[in-house]
Image (cartoon, rainbow, N blue to C red):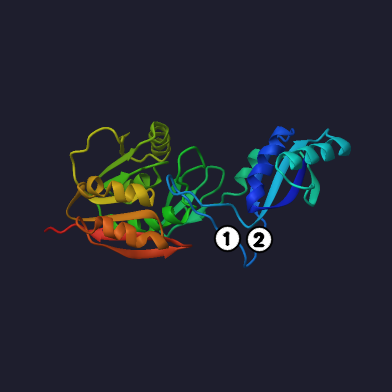
């Protein structure tokens, strides 16, 4: 058993209170939007070098304590943490007992098969494929990004279902779990290369490809690339998409197509401008505030 304590705090004090609770004996602490699920909810997005400027105006600080902690000791810990955080008194709080659970089973229950199109599904290993006649990629949540549930991954998968032609070549720039490269191979691409800056992602992609009997080449992004590809897809982040625009665009064969995601709708202009001297991009699709940019390199 554990004791979960939920306290209310404003943006200025939430982080200090979180640190103080850890010093006071909390096993873990998290901060959430107290307005989540209401019209006042404020989604926060960030990426390296451009993190959110602050926490939510109304924050919820949730601290987990050992289940053997008695009420007096718990209140003393909250009082110490509040003083350390510079609060005049302990904020209003609630407590809840959290029972031991089968965390593996609980985690698995959060991931159901994902329909990308009638033709393509992403299926966790513990589920039966809803449509055995479809292309079913077996993929479990892991250390590398890409399970099909994030809007940017879905946007890229939907595009691949339309773009991949039998025998074409595909580059997955920033492959993560390998899901895009695996999908391209299963959709009929003849040559698929996945690269990533993270060696563990390359290893995860290699394991996932083997599990799905998908043939693709995988390598670290430090290895020089000399080939060009009919299709290039990059699901990373806005800043790297801008900085790496010349390197990525150079890998698109004349007449080839490119799709970029990991971009918020508000960042579309930034990426389009960075790519303008190389390949003209346009918004191909949007989903939950994210976009997919598409373009074709001039050529035959």
Residue located 74% across and 34% down the image: 24
Which residue ends up furthest to the bottom in the rendered image? 39
Residue located 83% across and 34% down the image: 69
Viewer-proximal residue among 216 and 284: 284
Instruction: Tell me the crowding category of disc 2: few under 14, some 14 to 19, or many 20 or more residues within 10 angstroms, Cα based.
Output: some
Q: Quadrant of residue 49?
A: top left
| Helix, strand or loop at mark 2 | loop
Left/right placement of residue 255 relative to residue 258 reads: left
- For the C terminus, the image quarter is bottom left
Residue located 70% across and 46% down the image: 62
Instruction: Tell me the crowding category of disc 1: few under 14, some 14 to 19, or many 20 or more residues within 10 angstroms, Cα based.
Output: some
- For the N terminus, the image quarter is top right
Residue 35, numbered circle: 2
Q: Which residue is mark 1?
A: 42
Tell whether label 2 touches label 1 (CB within 8 Å). yes
Above or below — where is 251 with respect to 58? above
Viewer-proximal residue among 116 and 68: 68
Viewer-proximal residue among 257 and 275: 275
Sequence-first tag of 1 and 2: 2
| Helix, strand or loop at mark 1 | loop
The CA distance from mark 1 to mark 2 is 8 Å
Viewer-proximal residue among 153 and 73: 73
Image x and y of residue 50, in percent: 44, 49
Image x and y of residue 71, in percent: 87, 39
Image x and y of residue 215, in percent: 32, 39
Residue 33, numbered circle: none
Above or below — where is 192 with respect to 68? below
Image x and y of residue 41, in percent: 61, 62
Say whether residue 190 is visible.
Answer: no
Left/right placement of residue 40 relative to residue 178 reads: right
């Amino acid at each position: 058993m554990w004791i979960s304590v939920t306290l209310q705090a404003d943006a200025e004090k939430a982080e200090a209170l979180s640190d103080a609770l850890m010093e006071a004996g909390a096993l873990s602490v998290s901060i959430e939007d107290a307005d989540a699920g209401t019209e006042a909810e404020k989604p926060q997005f960030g990426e390296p070098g451009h993190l959110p400027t602050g926490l939510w105006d109304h924050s919820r600080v949730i601290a987990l304590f050992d289940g053997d902690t008695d009420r007096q000791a718990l209140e003393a810990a909250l009082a110490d943490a509040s003083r350390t955080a510079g609060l005049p008194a302990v904020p209003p709080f609630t407590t809840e007992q959290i029972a031991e659970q089968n965390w593996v089973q609980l985690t698995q229950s959060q991931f159901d098969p994902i329909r990308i199109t009638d033709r393509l599904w992403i299926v966790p290993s513990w589920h039966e494929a809803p449509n055995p006649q479809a292309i079913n990629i077996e993929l479990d949540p892991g250390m590398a990004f890409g399970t099909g549930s994030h809007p940017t991954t879905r946007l890229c998968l939907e595009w691949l279902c339309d773009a991949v032609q039998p025998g074409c070549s595909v580059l997955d720039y920033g492959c993560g779990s390998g899901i895009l490269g695996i999908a391209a191979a299963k959709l009929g691409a003849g040559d698929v290369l996945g690269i990533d800056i993270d060696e563990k992602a390359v290893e995860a992609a290699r394991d996932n490809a083997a599990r799905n009997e998908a043939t693709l080449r995988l390598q670290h992004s430090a290895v020089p690339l000399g080939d060009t590809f009919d299709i290039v897809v990059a699901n990373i982040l806005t800043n790297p998409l801008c900085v790496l625009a010349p390197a990525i665009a150079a890998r698109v064969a004349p007449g080839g197509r490119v799709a970029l995601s990991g971009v918020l709708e508000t960042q579309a202009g930034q990426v389009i401008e960075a790519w303008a001297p190389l390949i003209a991009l346009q918004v191909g699709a949007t989903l939950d505030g994210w976009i997919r940019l598409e373009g074709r390199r001039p050529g035959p």
